[in-house]
Image: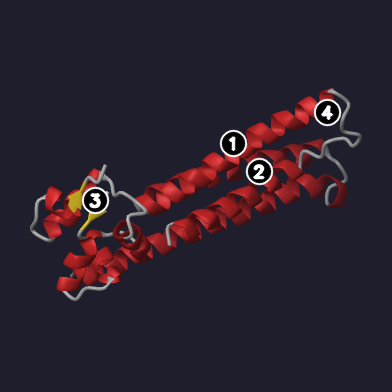
Amino acid sequence: MQRQNQTGGDQDAIKRAARLALWTLAWVASLALARFGPSLLWDSQPVASWAAVATNLAVGIGWIVAHARYLRGIDELQRKIMQDALAVTLGVGWVGGFAYVVADAADLIARDPNIGVFPALLAVIYMIATVVGTIRYR
Amino acid sequence: MKNRLKDLRTERNWTQADLAQHVSVSRQTINAIEKGKFDPSLPLAFRLAKLFNLKIEEVFVDDQ
């Protein structure tokens, strides 16, 4: 019975992780559509572009809900690792972002900021912080 | 926080995975608790103590 319950628990965890992975892929796909669609697919038609942005937002909300459900489903150590990683990501994003804004305002940065790099950078930081946390509690 | 988890587990010839299954957490969590790297929440500490038919203070000892 215990084994069956555990197997069921494992299957639930796999399902939650798979659901999160699917939502993540869907969000990345909708983001790519909103970003490259106007120039490659529909020749900058505003209605199509707005539809792509709205789709990206809707899928993004689904991704946030899936992430919250995933966090609720994992055990307390895994949740701590994730929360620590999110804290590091938020901190780095905040500190790094404001440092960039201040440096840009002082004309210390010659190149215009590419805002698209910022979320990608945060994603990399989140992944690194998660791996470091997992190793730390191994 | 020190604990007797490893002793109690090995007395019953359980692996970390077995113990993890009994209290519905990951093996990594049991390993981290045994090594003193992670202090469990109160509900998990109670589940572990109940599993071994002990009081919580007989499993976990405050070392501060």
Q: Which residue is mark 1?
A: A91
Determine contact: label 4, label 1, CB under 8 Å.
no
**Placement of the C terminus of chain B among the 4 image quadrants:** top left
Please tell me whether mark 3 sits on a helix, a strand or a loop.
Answer: helix
- For label 1, count other residues whose C-alpha is less than 10 Å away and answer few (under 14), some (14-19) or many (20+): few
Cα distance between the residues tagged 3 and 4: 49 Å
Q: Which residue is mark 3?
A: B44
Vertical order, A67 against A11 (above or below): above
Give whichever of discs 2 and 4 has the lower sequence position: 2
Left or right position of A75 against A98: left
Left or right position of A50 against B57: right
Task: Please provide percent x and percent y for residue A89.
Answer: 59, 42
- For label 4, count other residues whose C-alpha is less than 10 Å away and answer few (under 14), some (14-19) or many (20+): some
Cα distance between the residues tagged 3 and 2: 39 Å
Vertical order, A103 against B5 (above or below): above
Residue B62: image quadrant is: top left
Q: Please give the name of the residue rendered at 19% of the width and 49% of the height, measured from the top-left corner.
A: B61
Do the dots labelled 1 and 2 sit on one chain?
Answer: yes
Q: Please state which amino acid type lies under the numbered disc 2.
A: Asn
Q: Which residue is mark 4?
A: A104
Q: Please give the name of the residue rendered at 56% of the width and 53% of the height, measured from the top-left corner.
A: A23
Left or right position of A95 against A136: right
Q: Please state which amino acid type lies under the numbered disc 4.
A: Asp
Q: Please give the name of the residue rendered at 59% of the width and 36% of the height, measured from the top-left corner.
A: A91
Q: Which residue is mark 2?
A: A56
Q: Please give the name of the residue rendered at 49% of the width and 53% of the height, measured from the top-left corner.
A: A133
Give whichever of discs 1 and 2 has the lower sequence position: 2
Chain letter behind tag 4: A
What is the residue that sits farthest to the bottom in this orientation? B13
Do the dots labelled 3 and 4 sit on one chain?
Answer: no
